[in-house]
Amino acid sequence: MAESTTPPGGPRRGVLFDVDGTLIDSSYIHTIAWWNAFRQYGHDVPMAAIHQLVGMGGARLVDTLLPDGRNRDEDEDIMASHGALYASHWPSLRTLDGAKDLLGQCHAGGLAVALASSARERDLQVMRSVLDADSFIDAATSANDAEESKPAPDILEAALEAVGVEAANAVYVGDAVWDMKAAGALGIPAIGLTCGGIQAAQLREAGAVEVFDGPRQLLQNLGSSAIGRLLALQPHRQEG
């Protein structure tokens, strides 16, 4: 095996971003889509219970919320119903305040930027269109890129590989407990955002090293954040 070489200025560094609830204001849309999908198949699951699991992969979410004795043949249909119901809300999707600027600042600082999302490919493409920040994004993952969904770290591993960044040189930004756990499995510092509706204490308990209200507040405190420490190591970084 050939020895790896370190590029001038040190190893490549990067930031991985969850998308749903982190950059796009979609967590509660997912909640109501799941709620209606469950009801279509006779399952009355409280919205609060659903919301706590948004960010998990669909199969894992269904298996966690529904009883063991259910007709599992319906699981795929429930997930398909959720997908269709969520898609009906595509026109309502909005970027969270500061999201595009945050991606742009990380990119301008010389960091690789990857979207580490477990969303369906077509949902991801819609969200990328809403973000309108492709010039700042080096790579993106979807559910197609992982065998296991969060809290398993497969999606993060795929995103790291896509941008050529080692876990030791990365930071992850997400809004769910499952994001924090996935990052922790790889030893990646995770920044939690409460804009997805999960409380700061829950994110910290799950492993977040820092917690902010949303992309704008993280951007305003970028220099003192875990991302700022990566930026400080970058040669010739742009100030702005």
Image (cartoon, rainbow, N blue to C red):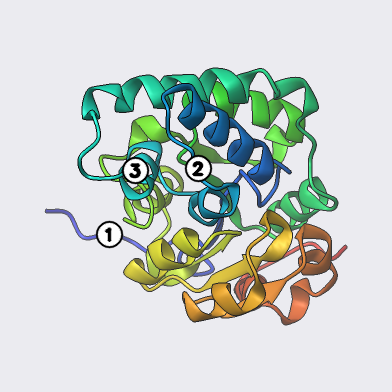
| Number of other residues with Cα within 10 Å of mark 3, as a class: few under 14, some 14 to 19, many 20 or more | some
Give amino acid for label 2: Ser
Give amino acid for label 1: Ser
Residue 232 seen: no
Residue 214 sits above or below residue 100 on the image: below
Q: Say what secondary structure mark 1 lies in.
A: loop
Residue pictured at 67% horizontal, 18% vertical: 88
Q: CA distance from mark 3 to mark 1?
A: 47 Å
| Number of other residues with Cα within 10 Å of mark 1, as a class: few under 14, some 14 to 19, many 20 or more | few
Q: Give residue 94's quadrant in the image.
A: top right
Front-lying residue, 237 or 61? 61
Mark before the other along the chain sequence, 3 or 1: 1
Residue 137 sits above or below residue 88 on the image: below
Mark before the other along the chain sequence, 2 or 1: 1
**Mark 3 or 1, which is nearer the eye?**
3
Q: Which residue, given by chain and number where applicable, does mark 2 sit on?
A: 117
Q: CA distance from mark 2 to mark 3?
A: 24 Å
**Mark 2 or 3, which is nearer the eye?**
3
Q: Position of residue 55 (x, y in %)?
A: 50, 49
Q: Which residue, given by chain and number where applicable, does mark 1 sit on?
A: 4
Residue 76 sits above or below residue 54 on the image: above
Q: Which residue, given by chain and number where applicable, does mark 3 sit on?
A: 66
Horizontal side of 22 relative to 117 (left or right) equals: right
